[in-house]
Image (cartoon, grey):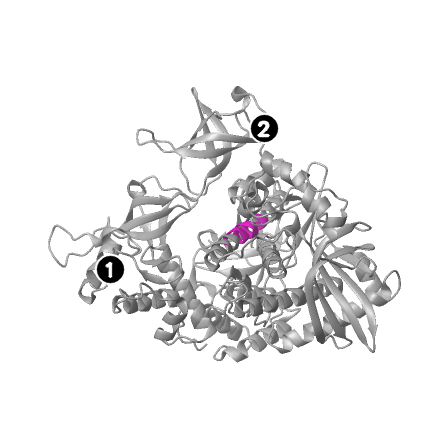
Amino acid sequence: MSKSPKRLSLRQQIHQESDRILRWFRGCDLSDTGGVSDRDLAVALGISDPFDLNVMGQALDKLVAQKILTRRQDLSLRLTNKVTSGAGHARGQDQATRHGEGILARMEFTHGGLAFARAVDSDADWMVSSEHVRRALPGDLVRIVPLSAFPSSKGKGRRPSSSRSTSQGRDRAAVVEVVERYRTHFVGTVRRKGQRYFLEPDLKGFQGGLELLPPAQPLAGLTRAWDQSEGLKAVGAWLDWPESSPWPRVELAEWLGSPGEHSTEMAAIGVEFGFSLHFGAEALRQASQPSQSLAPNDLQGRKDFRGIPTMTIDPQDAKDFDDALSIRPLGQGRWEVGVHIADVSYYVRPGTELDREAASRATSVYMVHQVLPMLPENLSNLVCSLRPNEDKLCYSAVFEVDEEARIHSTWIGRTCIRSLRRFSYEDAQTVLDTGQGDWAEELQVLNRMAIGMRQRRFEAGSIGFETEEIRFHLDPQGFPTEVWVKERKPAHMLIEDWMLMANRAVAEHLTKAVSERRLPASVYRVHDFPDPERLGKLADFAEFMGYTLSVSSRSQIAASLNRLIEESEGKPESEILQQMAIRSMAKAIYTTRNIGHYGLAFSHYTHFTSPIRRYPDLLVHRLLAHLDGSMNGPTQAYTELELERLCKYDSEKERAAAMAERAATRFKQLQMLQGKEDQIWEGMITSIGEQGVWVTLDYNRCDGLLPLSSLDHDRFYYDAEEMALVGSSRNSRLAPGQRLQVRIARLDLRFRRLEFRYHLSAEQR
């Protein structure tokens, strides 16, 4: 198999661009102007391509975060005072940054307790021995110094000693400073040792405990006697780590309950990923004030849509309905379609405690049969929720559309609506399938238009990824008794396509306002070009599996990926190819820098349609309110710097929420496997690495590691070129897509770990 040429990863490109920017600043005299804008810097560096502009933006963010560049009040950039601009000092400054002040890195720990520091601005990492960890905890931002940076006392040219590098050739480093703690709250099990209480944290790789101190104030909610807390799960809030103590100290923040209970474990996962379980008293008070009934002044400046047929389509168990569709004929083959979104900005005012708590959460977290909402229940499930037969305040995008789903005009503004029918997805799908029932004509028209919009989107280069969504049935005690993969049907896609249309229209509307200087900046949902290195690996694997993926030209990639998905559909390798393709994609983020959305093939895109559960959507509504001067909009627009900071934070919280949701799903999958270690399980290899192979079980879609060390029926080695484990004595082979039988070797619910052992059939023995 021919290998694709080596491609730089996105991180490597950002690192290279950072060096180029730094060289430019050191070669310029900005004493007269004081600083340079992003736009002028791009011109000076000859950057105009949207992808390259985004790389430059991320490089600038990195240099500002490292305090190498300073962003002034007018958003211009200049070198910090401590960085000299003379070319003769540049090399010395680099040495000081790397070897004197240290390298910024994140601490990572293995389950066995080995510690590693991974540089924040490159792919480099170092092993950190226990004597050099310097009280760093998993995830902490630290400064490290590579031990190889210190010259040997035995003379020049001496090879690094074993204390400076590992036996595998990995360099070692020492932590010189803990810059920032990753966690403020820790989840764990309470243990008593003599007169002291400790929290045994659910923290991968941390060896030891956290000394647990009583709370300074009485706890609200679940109470427990201090001397009856042994074995309970609890939350501890970080206090400090005194120099005189071998243990960090935390203060009891909350009792969660007994390990294994559904509510306990879901709450523990929420805290583990940085989400609050409760709202403060003042936020709850403010959320309780709005009434569900509307007063006449609530309708001022709004278009009245209450007489127009309007419906919601949501999951069967949904409680927060934040979007609705209205439709009416205009004659001559045209229709008016309204996408109506709950006007959360009318009730959540900037600067209030309610707003501060919503901003801190940034998103609702949907775990298995449990939600940690961004807003208190009175707002999310009652006042703002577009419940049937109730007058509700909305922000709406209203389109005049023809039968071919072409948009002829768009209006965006505040409205009042009244939903006349609450459809579940199943109800709506039945109407679409049979053509009969309530709202049959309206749903058929909306679906035909959605299909037309979808076709044009794919013709423009949108990519049709499908990701599995696992669902569970729980018994009264919260134990999972059934699992299934949620199926996406036309009713789901109908809603999705209209929401995409509204998000796109609002993004274009806000972009125009920015270009006309009516807004300093806007919020975008952007999706970058795929990582070239990962695309290359995907192309190599696809070729090995008998498919062709063209990655040499950006214009070919989307069509080629769609063709790969279509050609592999229904085949064993389909899921693996799609997962590899998804991993090759960049992560979608929020930002004020519009580079478009690659996966959707939109040049303008934002999130407008879910302000009950996403803070960026609430920001977008406030920007719209500022433009139209309607009630309760902010008195002045957010600055670009304020919006960018919020976007970055919201992107981080979105990733944390996704990890929490995956962790909750995995916990339930593992619960279903408890006590079944003697059974033989069928599964498929989904990925391979030097550790071994990852196998996904047919039974409940749970994956686990089949370690290389456990494959004792042959001597296997990892062949990176063939992407397989190859046996040396029997010429056997384990590769992605291959089916096999396994038994459970290790199941650890606390850390959500699963390991298998290979089951040899009678023919294989």
Counting from the top left corner in percent of width and height, residue 251 is at 46, 30
- What residue span does the magenta drawing correspond to? 652-662
Question: Element under label 1?
Answer: helix
Query: Is residue 73 something one can see in this rendering?
Result: yes
Quarter occupied by the C terminus: bottom right
Q: Give above or below for 217 relative to 683.
A: above
Tag count: 2
Report the disc number at residue 220: 2
Who is closer to the viewer here, 616 or 643?
A: 643
In this rendering, would 610 be left or right of 729?
right
Q: Which residue is located at x 78 percent, y 76 percent?
A: 403
Residue at point 57% right, 73% down?
Answer: 561
Measured in 3D between alpha carbons, the distance from the residue under mark 2 to the one under mark 1, in whole angstroms, is 52 Å
Q: Nearer the viewer, residue 471 or 645?
A: 645
The stretch drawn in magenta includes residue 653? yes
Q: Earlier in the sequence, mark 2 or mark 1?
A: 1
Q: Name the kind of residue labelled 1 in the image.
A: Asp
Q: Secondary structure at mark 2?
A: loop
